[in-house]
Amino acid sequence: MLECIEEKQILESEKPWCACGCGLRVNSNKRNGGWYDYRLGHKLFPVPKEPPPKCNCGCNKDVKWNNEQHHWNEYVRGHNGQTHGERIKSESESPPLCKCGCGLPVFKSVRSKGWNVYINGHYWHDDNVRMRASELIKKRYESVDYCEKRRESIIKAFESHPEFKEQRSRAQKNSYKEKPMRRIRQSIAHKKRYKDPDAIERISQAQKKSYKEHPERRERQSKNSRQVYIDNPELRRKQSERAVLNWQNPEYIAKVFGNHKAGLSSKPEQIINSLTPENVRYVGNGQWHRKITIHTKDGQVITKHKCPDFKVTGLNKVIEVHGDYWHKGEDVDALIQAYKDQGIECLVIWEHEIYEDIQAVLNRIADFLEQDNWQMTLAI
């Protein structure tokens, strides 16, 4: 390696001088194996033999010859547009800090010769910039026409280029890996959005419209969700363990049942609620719940937090109103026994019993409550 360096130094020193008198050495001519007489461009426009002028900024440094325009430069490189005093002052002053608030100094701008406002890549770190951009995006998405056009363009792109969907998904995953804070910010934004009732209604209407116009989309989404759990047994195991831990936390249980804002959702529940005394309180919206263990006939053991339909105030008694469709095939005796193990009496009423003979149902409720002073007269 040292021998090569010494050989290059010797060859450089052996190069002849340019015939124009510029004081520079010429390059070798590879065609004839000799040397050029002039440097490139010095034969037609030779460098003047007089000494070079000084820089116009006042630094007293020699400027260089401009081989492209064939004249002396007016300034030394980097001294253009400033006097010597201004340049010295700008070089001595400390750089300002980045406007995003990171506390780091900015660099000089090559174009404007001044200080940059932001460090490269810190523009979007500024809260004011993100806020203005967010407001513009919100205004854009408030337009129904814009949302419709965007949705149609995405669907059209997916149909015409199937690989585009896979590329977009891969790019998003890589972006989340490289920038984890982006996923956290998006999650916080989604949570804020779903706290707005107008936003929830707008999203719901758009989804219903999409499912109505494209029925295959709902089936495709459901199929993809099922396929994810089939292909990833480890994911199923982790979610199961996470759910078990969550349901052991009293705060999580109170939060889940506290979010049930629905009232009397079914007609049978409304009938029972209107015909029973005041101490039979509807608690199907999560106001009252207990942890029970159900032993089914096939040997399964199911432990869950059960929220009955009605609770008798002052007594450990509950009433369950079962719909014929949703509770078809359930083991009612196992449910009653599960409540009994917790010291709670349970009465189960089926939907068809209410419609076939409501008076018999009310008599059963009266016997269950053991209230002799309660008499119900039906106006039929």
Image (cartoon, rainbow, N blue to C red):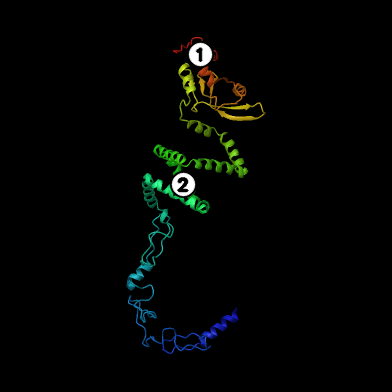
Judging by the rendered image, the residue that carries numbered circle 2 is 186
Whether residue 244 is visible: yes
The reply to whether the C-beta atoms of the residues labelled 1 and 2 are less than 8 Å apart is: no
Task: Give how far across and how far down residue 185 sits, in percent.
Answer: 46, 47
Q: Is mark 1 on a helix, strand or loop?
A: helix
Task: Give how far across and how far down residue 52 sits, in percent.
Answer: 36, 83
In the rendered structure, the answer to whether residue 71 lies left or right of residue 284 reads: left
**Residue at (48, 31) in percent of width and height:** 258
Estimate the spatial distance between the alpha carbons at disc 1 and disc 2, rounded to whole Å: 56 Å
Residue 145 or 119: which is nearer the viewer? 145
Q: Around disc 1, counting alpha carbons within 10 Å, would you say few (fewer than 14), some (14 to 19), or many (20 or more)?
A: some
The answer to whether 375 is drawn above or below residue 208 in the figure is above
Residue 8 or 233: which is nearer the viewer? 233
Task: Give how far across and how far down residue 194 sits, in percent.
Answer: 44, 39
Screen quadrant of the C terminus: top left
The answer to whether 248 is drawn above or below residue 102 in the figure is above
Q: Which amino acid does label 1 sit on?
A: Gln
Considering every residue shown, the one lying at the far right of the view is 299
**Residue at (47, 42) in percent of width and height:** 214
**Residue at (51, 33) in percent of width and height:** 256
Judging by the rendered image, the residue that carries numbered circle 1 is 359
Whether residue 314 is visible: no
Screen quadrant of the N terminus: bottom right
Q: Around disc 2, counting alpha carbons within 10 Å, would you say few (fewer than 14), some (14 to 19), or many (20 or more)?
A: few
Q: What residue type is labelled 2?
A: Gln
Q: What element carries label 2?
A: helix
In the rendered structure, the answer to whether residue 46 lies left or right of residue 180 reads: left
Task: Give how far across and how far down residue 60 sits, in percent.
Answer: 35, 79
In the rendered structure, the answer to whether residue 182 lies left or right of residue 223 reads: left
